[in-house]
Amino acid sequence: MNEVFLIGKIHSLGENRKDGLFTLEVKRNYKDENGQFIFDYFPCKIWKGAMDVMISNCKVGDVIAIKARLEEDSDSKIIIIVEKLKFIYKDNRFQKN
């Protein structure tokens, strides 16, 4: 079974938002030796109808939950393919102009 569930903040959106590419920032559930949380940045691609919803509603800094699968691209890198998207909250403090 190839299923991944993540909750994170939209860190960046692709230059061409219609290509469906974005980066999801996910906080680990533990702190480093300095007491700071560590974040991972995952490349994601969103398909079909969910892409239209994301284009019209999502901004950098918004927190979302995704149901996805893992795929290997032509460069042998793992990419997260988003199948479902749910908005957790919008936070305009994290928006980039």
Image (cartoon, grey):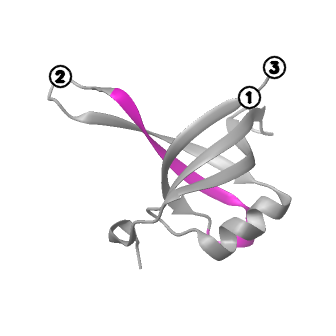
| Label pair 3/2, CB-CB below 8 angstroms | no
Where does the magenta region start and end?
15-29
- Quick one: label 2, few (<14), some, or many (20+) residues within 10 Å? few
Identify which amino acid the numbered label 1 is placed on: Glu
Residue occupied by mark 1:
3
Q: Which residue appears at 77% of the width and 34% of the height?
A: 71
Figure check: 44 above or below 60: above
Badge 1: residue crowd in 10 Å (few <14, some 14–19, many ≥20): few
Which circle marks residue 1 in the picture?
A: 3
Instruction: State which mark lies toward you, 2 or 1.
Output: 1
For the point 51% across and 61% down, the residue is 12
Q: Check disc 3: other Cα within 10 Å, few if <14, some if 14-19, many if 20+.
A: few
For residue 91, side relative to residue 43 (left or right): left
Q: Nearer the viewer, mark 3 or mark 2?
A: 3
* Residue 23 percent coordinates (x, y): 56, 52
For the point 72% across and 68% down, the residue is 53
Image location of residue 41, percent across then percent down: 49, 43
The numbered mark, 3 or 2, whose residue comes first in the sequence reads 3
Inter-mark Cα distance, 2 to 1: 31 Å
Mark 3, secondary structure of its residue: loop
Q: How far apart, in angstroms, are the residues tagged by discs 1 and 3? A: 6 Å
Which amino acid does the dot numbered 2 rest on?
Glu
Q: Secondary structure at mark 2?
A: loop
What is the three-letter code of the residue carrying label 3? Met
Assign a secondary structure to mark 1. loop
Q: Say if 41 sits above or below 14 in the image.
A: above
Along the viewing direction, whichever of 90 and 97 lies nearer the viewer: 90
Q: Which residue is mark 2?
A: 33
Q: Quadrant of the C terminus?
A: bottom left
* Mark sitting earlier along the chain (2/1): 1
* Label 1 with label 3: CB-CB less than 8 Å: yes
